[in-house]
Image (cartoon, rainbow, N blue to C red):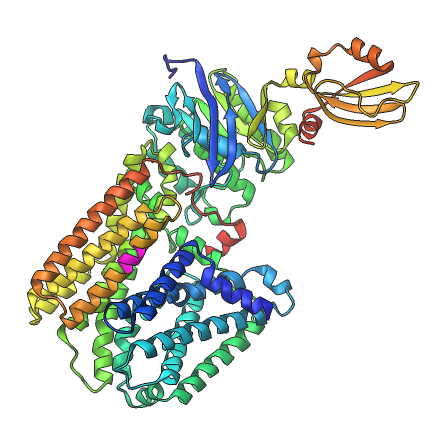
Amino acid sequence: MNDSRTDSVLSTQHLGKTIGGRAILSDISVSLDRGDVVGVIGKNGAGKTTLLETVLGFSPATAGSSQIYGHDSFMLPAAVKSRVGFVPQQDDLMGMLTGKQQLGLVAALYGGWDSGLIDRLAGEWEVPLQQRIATLSGGERQKLSTLLALGHRPDLLVLDEPVSSLDPIARRRFLQQILEYTADQQRTVLFSSHIVSDLERVANRIWIIRDGQMIWQGDLDALKESVVRLHVRASQPLPASLDIPHTLFEQVTGTSAVVAVSHWEQSDPAAVSRRLNADIEVEALGLEDIFLELNR
Amino acid sequence: MKGALQTAWLMFTCLGVQRWLNAVGAALLATGLALGHAGAPLVAMAIGTACLLLTPAFAGGMIFRGIAGARICRLIPHGRLQLLLGLLLVLILGAALFATVTALAGSRLTIGFPLLFARAAFVGTIALLATFAGAVSVLTMTCVFIGLGSLPVILPSLSRVGGIAYLFGSTSALLVVTACIWTTFGLWFLRATFITPLAVAEAGMAQGGGIVGRLKSSRSTALTTFLLGPSGIAWGAIAGLFGTALLTLLPRLTALWSGGAVRPAMADLLPLAGMVCVFGGITGFAVTRRAKQLWLRGGYSRAESFAVCETQMWRYYAASCSLVPVCFAVAIFLGKPAMSMVLLLSCAVTIGACLLYFSLMRVQPWSVADVLVAVALIAAFVFLLGALNNAWLSPAATTALLAVQALAAWLLRRTAKSRWQRIDWLIHKPRQYSAQVLQRAS
């Protein structure tokens, strides 16, 4: 199933998207390799859904380009589409059907459908397939929607807010199974979520979007090394501005200050300490705090 | 009072296409008024008025349900009263506009502004309240549209019946009846514990409605189901058969009620021809949005998606109108002029095809060209029915008109196909409904 043309699963070059004169995405250049589990985070309206739907070819880019398995996203051939699974933020289920009927119809659109996998997952996730979809809860619809995307065993799985309606137990179990699904290093997962703790648990790479621009893309560990909070304590009053490079946030109160910085791994802590004549304590941040600092 | 004014404003301006139609309608009306009240300016005034009143008359009740069904309305002090006054204001404004234009244009009319106003208010009341009541399910909405569509046929016949003739000839009687209807509706509306929101009806339609039996898990079933809903074609066929039966029987019944007055040969089949025209455009808007699923799951390119949607729409169209050609054949068998019948049906089908491709074209925001095409289609529809009913055109001219319409359908198809090459499903995505709405709809 591997495409000989490229090892890159997905890539974009200076991708831009404007809708009604408003720039939703601008200058996004990212890439995704086989086996990656990438989490996309951003505030509401940051452009996460637009990014996912544009790279999948649902929507034409207004600038730049994007490719999946080396093919232009907007003109994806059927063979490539069959390697992609997508769980949209708003499901496209048909309320009058039962879950089983909907699965049957979607299965009919694909050449290979792993009924065994779907039956197993439906059992484990407790999805009532015999019930009409209109009577399912939000969480059950979301699980069913994910089953529809997994049945043809896609190499690239794209999930837009896949766990927003799930309770914490279901969420953890669901994410664990997504990890198992990618465990053979052949499959790639790209998913967006507001629940940052989930991303931290399963993603090995993070994309952070703010106002349509990619402000961070890279390994989660590297992100944690890069964005930190500094607690500065001096014996004499500190200046109003500490002038630390890449400052995201700064609060100076007399002889102490709290500063959030990015790119800390490029800084020289000792030099900063000497310049300010102060002790600096570096606090490592969790992904949620990093996200908050980057979006202040 | 501010709330009432806002409601009335919304009813006239809430849809994007409505604002465009208003602009075109106002321009045509102003041109007609400036140039005189006969000949071409009169036609401009008639089309202008139709553009201004079309949406409030045929969708006003649905829009009103959309506003009134929102739960937030219950929290606004005197919210429902303000909405009701707004709806009444829409009726008064619409009836006044219609009566004014008709009185100005119709120098040959023997009736004056008051009676015209009273008639317009009465018919407008029926249209607004029927669409309000009907916008809860596919079946009721279909019935309401068929009923409204057949009003022009029924009313002239009914107006010859004794009591009804008196009603339609008396301004005060009409106004009293209209006021009684509004009082009854108002009392119910202000006291109703729950008003089913429009989204419930929409969601029911989006899901195809009806009871779903066993579905074959095949590619063709999947395509039909995803595009038209699980019982889409069946519903289309039922609505079409029901509509055909109703529109065939009603003229006969009204003729009986009116003392057996013989109707002109052509006019008997005009409602059916109108139905064939309108059914062409009914499904396109939903289908283009639902085609999103085919892009990734079906593996179709945009051009292939267009072809699949086109096929499904024609199937729906054929199912809906399957009985109409039979009715025309029976009419010919019973002695109606064969040539006229064939031309009428052909013209209706070509306008239906134009509407079908026009709805498939709607994959980008409304442009000036789209609005002009919409106005042209409405004008063609009105002109066709008028021309065929009053024998304005010779068979040769009608054949030429038919060729022009076929050419227009071909051009619209080309435009639609070309637009589908760049369809943006981020914008034209399927409508979403809350779980609560979906449960109610089911």
x 29%, y 56%: residue: B236
In the rendering, at what x and y percent does residue B401 appear? Answer: 15, 58
Quadrant into which the N terminus of chain B falls = bottom right
In this rendering, the answer to whether B385 lies above or below B402 is below
Furthest residue in direction right, as rendered: A235
x 19%, y 62%: residue: B324
- Of B328 and A14, the residue lying toward us: A14
One can see residue B87 in this view? yes
Asked whether residue A9 is drawn in magenta, I would say no
In the rendered view, does A134 fall on the left or right side of B314? right
Q: Provide the major secondary structure of the magenta segment.
A: helix
In the rendering, at what x and y percent does residue B372 appear? Answer: 31, 54
- Residue A235 picture quarter: top right
- Of B263 and A254, the residue lying toward us: A254
- Of A246 and A32, the residue lying toward us: A246
x 38%, y 49%: residue: B366
In this rendering, the answer to whether A176 lies above or below B412 is above
- Of B282 and B54, the residue lying toward us: B54
One can see residue A121 in this view? no
In the rendered view, does B119 fall on the left or right side of A146? left
In the rendering, at what x and y percent does residue B10 appear? Answer: 50, 62
In the rendered view, does B107 fall on the left or right side of B123? left
Region in magenta: B374-378
Give the total of numbered labels. Answer: 0
